[in-house]
Image: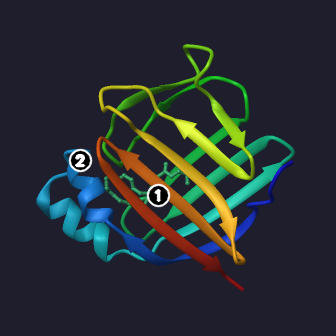
């Protein structure tokens, strides 16, 4: 286990989030709500098994997977797209050093996310097309 992301985290900064939502074709009204939200990330990690819960007063999003095992993702309540993770065998959720990296193959080009810990904080880099959003979470409780 290269890094331990587990815990309860609260969003502190959210750079270029609206641009990221635009790249995902999220409509104006939903974007305005989404950028005003506080987000809580609850991560459970058991070896290479992960459970992510992204919680807000507007929508919640849950994703579970095992590192190195392919899966289909449906971004229900977000941009509602189907994504394949790992179906070409070289694309999976993997550890790149201490970064947990996911490439989301689907309708949108260059879609991916990366999680890592830096200075006691949880980072999430969300990429779509040429937009990179950086979210920083601090520990809750
Ligand atoms: C993700 O993180 C993204 C999790 O997979 C959610 C964070 C940002 C929202 C992404 C797309 C937004 C599309 C529509 C906006 C509508 C509602 C926003 C609600 C935000 C809270 C759920 C990777 C990893 C595990 O942490 O999922």
- Residue at (59%, 22%) from the top-left corner? 86
In the rendered view, tell whether residue 50 sits above or below residue 137.
Answer: above
Q: Position of residue 76 (x, y in %)?
A: 40, 41
Q: Is mark 1 within 8 Å of ligand 1?
A: yes
- Residue at (58%, 24%) from the top-left corner? 91
First of labels 2, 1 by sequence position: 2
Q: Position of residue 27 (x, y in %)?
A: 15, 53
Instruction: Give the left or right position of residue 85, taking residue 122 as reference.
Output: left
Q: Quick one: which residue is furthest to the top in this view?
A: 88
In space, the residues marked 2 and 1 are separated at their CA atoms by 20 Å
- Residue at (61%, 19%) from the top-left corner? 90
- Quadrant location of the C terminus in the rendered image: bottom right
Q: Classify 10 Å Cα crowding around label 2: few (below 14), some (14-19), many (20 and above).
A: some
Question: What residue did someone put label 1 on?
Answer: 60
Question: Quick one: SS at disc 1?
Answer: loop
Q: Nearer the viewer, residue 64 or 123?
A: 123
Q: Position of residue 111 (x, y in %)?
A: 40, 38
Question: Quick one: SS at disc 2?
Answer: helix
Of marks 2 and 1, the one in the foreground: 2
Q: Is the Cβ of the residue at disc 2 closer than 8 Å to that at disc 1? A: no
Disc number placed over residue 23 in the picture, else none: 2
Write down which quadrant ligand 1 falls in. Answer: bottom left
Identify the image quadrant of residue 67. Answer: top right
Q: Quick one: which residue is furthest to the bottom in this view?
A: 141
Q: Is mark 2 within 8 Å of ligand 1?
A: no
Identify the image quadrant of residue 94. Answer: top right
Q: Position of residue 5 (x, y in %)?
A: 74, 61
Instruction: Give the left or right position of residue 130, taking residue 32 as reference.
Output: right
In the rendered view, tell whether residue 26 sits above or below residue 39.
Answer: above
Instruction: Give the left or right position of residue 36, taking residue 83 as reference.
Output: left
């Amino acid at each position: 286990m290269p890094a331990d992301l587990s815990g309860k985290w609260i969003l502190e900064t959210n750079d270029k989030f609206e641009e990221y939502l635009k790249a995902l074709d999220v409509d104006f009204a939903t974007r305005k709500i989404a950028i005003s939200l506080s987000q809580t990330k609850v991560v459970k990690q058991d070896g290479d098994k992960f459970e992510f819960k992204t919680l807000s007063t507007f929508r919640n999003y849950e994703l579970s997977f095992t590192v190195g095992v392919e899966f289909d993702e449906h971004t229900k309540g977000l941009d509602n797209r189907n994504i394949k993770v790992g179906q070409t065998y070289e694309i999976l959720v993997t550890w790149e050093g201490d970064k947990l990296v996911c490439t989301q193959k689907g309708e949108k080009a260059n879609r991916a996310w990366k999680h890592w810990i830096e200075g006691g904080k949880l980072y999430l880099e969300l990429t779509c097309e040429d937009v990179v959003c950086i979210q920083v979470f601090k520990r809750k409780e």
